[in-house]
Image (tube, helix red, strand yellow):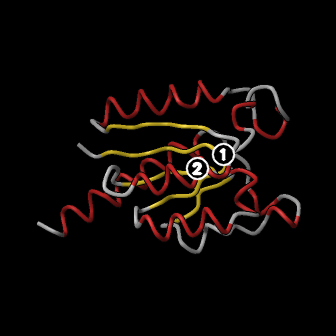
Amino acid sequence: MIRILVLHGPNLNMLGVREQDLYGRQTLNDINGLLDSWAKEAGVHLEAKQSNHEGDLVTWIQEARGQFDAIVINPAAYTHTSIALRDAVLSAEVPTVEVHLSNIHQREEFRQHSFLAGVALGQISGFGPTSYMLGVHAALDHVQSKQSASK
């Protein structure tokens, strides 16, 4: 069974409350519920975690090595500040898809740079909760393609 780790960064636990005009009314539990339903239908083991602490995210990325086939991460504000997350993705060597609810390229200039984009398989942004769905689909497709190629 393919295993995908979904990581949610800082302040995403406040979805549905904070800046609803930008992030929408769905809560993180709503998004995780959508992902869980999809995973059951797809026959994928999906585990979701959220932390406001950079070190937790780094540790979970490192621990994913050998345990998960792919990572889907919304690093939130750490997107623009964390070289530690970038280094963790590099060292874990687990295919990683970066996702964002809002289109970071249409936001303030300081939000338009991602430290993870250069080490991720790809970046999906601007589609609200659908960004997560597109991210897990992309991660699954990548893993399945690699598995098919190695047979």
Q: Nearer the viewer, residue 127 or 143?
A: 143
Task: Specify which label sits upstream in the sequence, 1 or 2.
Answer: 1
Q: Residues within 10 Å of mark 2 (few under 14, many from 20)?
A: many
Q: Nearer the viewer, mark 1 or mark 2?
A: 2
Tell me: 143 left or right of 48: left
Q: Position of residue 148 (x, y in %)?
A: 18, 63
How far apart marks 1 and 2 lie (CA) works out to 7 Å
Q: Position of residue 14 (x, y in %)?
A: 75, 30
Q: Position of residue 87 (x, y in %)?
A: 56, 69
Labelled pair 1, 2 in contact (Cβ < 8 Å)? yes
**In the structure shown, which secondary structural element does the residue marked by tag 1 occupy?**
loop
Residue at left offset 50%, top offset 42% = 133
As drawn, 48 above or below 119: above
**Residue at the extreme left:** 151
Total label count?
2
Residue type, numbered disc 1: Gly
Residue at left offset 69%, top offset 32% = 13
Q: Which quarter shows the N terminus?
A: top left
Q: Position of residue 127 (x, y in %)?
A: 65, 46
Q: Residues within 10 Å of mark 1 (few under 14, many from 20)?
A: many
Tell me: 128 left or right of 109: left
Residue that label 2 marks:
57
Q: Which quarter shows the C terminus?
A: bottom left
Residue at left offset 75%, top offset 63% = 80
As drawn, 41 above or below 83: above
Residue that label 1 marks:
9
Residue type, numbered disc 2: Leu
Residue at left offset 75%, top offset 69% = 113
